[in-house]
Amino acid sequence: MDVLYFAWVRERIGLPRERVVTDAATVADLVEELRAREDRYAIAFSDLSALRVAVDQDLADFGTSLDGVREVAFFPPMTGG
């Protein structure tokens, strides 16, 4: 699947997107796999309350299943004005 990173998540990881092969069942499982990769991922995913996630371009939560998913995106909460 494609994993996309936006704003400060992208800055901390150093990539805008990457192709990930995973057996993760949920977004939370994917996050744990990514955290275990390197410190830069551990830092980017250290506070999940500061992150939002979209699965196949729909807002989702970290318990969302990854079955059949093609794209997961991580980004900080958006504010309006």
Image (cartoon, rainbow, N blue to C red):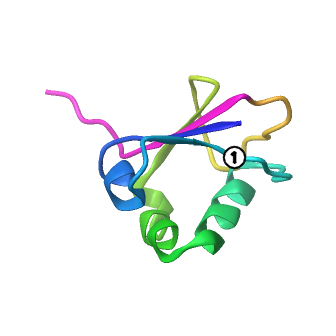
Looking at the image, residue 77 sits to the left or right of residue 59; the answer is left
Q: What is the three-letter code of the residue carrying label 1?
A: Val
Residues 1 and 69: in front is 1
Secondary structure of the residue carrying numbered label 1? loop
- In percent of the image, x 80 and y 51: which residue is there? 22
In the figure, 55 relative to 34: above or below?
above
Circle 1 is placed at which residue position? 20
- In percent of the image, x 38 and y 52: which residue is there? 9
**Magenta-drawn stretch contains 72:** yes
Instruction: Please state, as top left, top right, bottom left or bottom right, where the N terminus lies in the image.
Output: top right
Where is residue 44 drawn, in percent x and y? 43, 63
Looking at the image, residue 57 sits to the left or right of residue 27; the answer is left
Q: Dividing the picture into quarters, in which one does residue 81 lie?
A: top left
Segment colored magenta: 70-81
In the figure, 4 relative to 68: above or below?
below
**Magenta-drawn stretch contains 26:** no
